[in-house]
Image (tube, helix red, strand yellow):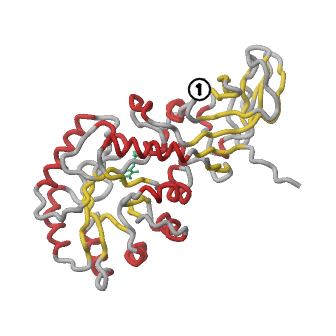
Amino acid sequence: MTESPPRAWAEIDLSALRHNLRIARERSGKDVMAVIKGGAYGHGLVEVARALESENLPYLGVANAGEARRLFEAGIATRPYILGATLPAEREEIAARGWTPCLCSFDEIEHFNSLGRNKPIQAHLALDTGMGRGGFLPDQLGAALQKIAAAPGIQLTGIGSHLPVADEDPNFTRQQFELFDTLVEKLPGLPDNFQVHLSNSAGLLDFQSRTANLVRPGLLLYGISPLPCHQDLLTPVMTLKSRVSIVNRLPKGHGVSYGRTLLERDTTTAVLGLGYGDGYPRALSGKNTQVLINGALCPLLGRVTMDQIIVDVTDLPHCQSGDEAELFGPRLLVTDLARKAGTIPWEILTQITPRVTRLYR
Ligand SMILES: *Cc1c(COP(=O)(O)O)cnc(C)c1O
């Protein structure tokens, strides 16, 4: 007996991932912390980490101790960096494992200092230059640095900040770079290998810092540009696929899917074995969404259901059960689907569910 193949799968092109990393390096001229939080944006936390292990990256950016632990348990040697403030209950493990936290509060400085009594903890300092999600405000920076200088349990190895509107408001972002650079330039006596970082994907594509020596791209590594004008530099890493389960001929006026969207002509439909239960957004219903079958674009008909969608294949010369369909990928950008669904590509990628088998190439 052979095991049945999956109805929906995501092909993950790891050579595209390495290509995009090369673009991030060339474009920024800086070291790269690969941001792999959110299960590497749905691409598979451990598999992506392993693919990047030979790239000599200083850090892998993760969301929390749980993601860092999965890397540890998989034997990944690259050091996890915890993006964002830590919970008190996470800090003992972070300290014991030598993961790098970014200090966002005086509480964290005190707590990590006591946890690092025997072996100092390497940590970065987070500055809030506009994100409003944690970190010291510019006028608290002096006090934070004093407190860290008086904390033998903490070795400060870097400083970072984050960009809330790098793909929306270039004027604000330019001011943010200027503020960040000015603050960093005033820091006294930094060690040579001190790590300074500000840019996410949009930041590294469009802006240059005078002081940063590290960038933190996420989306860009997966081949999706937050700014459409740079999309051609990148190769999408994930292609979401499914198969035609059945082809039906239905008369004009017949209803299709929940809610009974009425057919406007005699229609040949193909049913695909994937739906919102796989992370294909239900919000794509009725938005002129298309899928690729045998290289041709076919319109989505009616509402997306949990496990199946229906598409119009009337104009295809051939379409039969078993034919492969592409929902997004290099030829059908997840960015365009996101716009139609009223969301962002980050959300669609991270919401592809575990039912979708990831196949690594
Ligand atoms: C998620 C995240 C990034 C990566 O952002 P992209 O827009 O996906 O490149 C960088 N820095 C921080 C602090 C983040 O939370």
Judged from this view, the residue extending furthest toward the right is: 1
**x 67%, y 45%: residue:** 9
Q: How many marks?
A: 1
Density class for disc 1 (Cα within 10 Å; few <14, some 14-19, many ≥20) is: some
Residue 321 pos. (x, y %):
82, 32
Which of 264/40 is in front? Answer: 40
Q: Is residue 206 above or below residue 187?
A: above
Q: Is mark 1 within 8 Å of ligand 1?
A: no
Image-quadrant location for residue 230 = top left
Q: Is residue 37 left or right of residue 213?
A: right
Q: Which residue is mark 1?
A: 287
Q: Is residue 192 left or right of residue 19?
A: left
Residue 268 pos. (x, y %):
79, 21
Residue 124 pos. (x, y %):
28, 64
- The quadrant of the rendering that contains the N terminus is bottom right
**x 26%, y 66%: residue:** 157
Residue 106 pos. (x, y %):
24, 69
Q: Is residue 19 left or right of residue 24?
A: right
Q: Is residue 175 above or below residue 339?
A: below
**x 12%, y 64%: residue:** 189
Check disc 1 and give the amino acid type.
Lys
Image-quadrant location for residue 63 = bottom left
Which of 190/321 is in front? Answer: 190
Q: Is residue 333 left or right of residue 307?
A: left
Q: Is residue 138 above or below residue 118?
A: above
**x 54%, y 71%: residue:** 73
Mark 1 falls on what kind of element? loop
Q: Is residue 331 above or below residue 88?
A: above
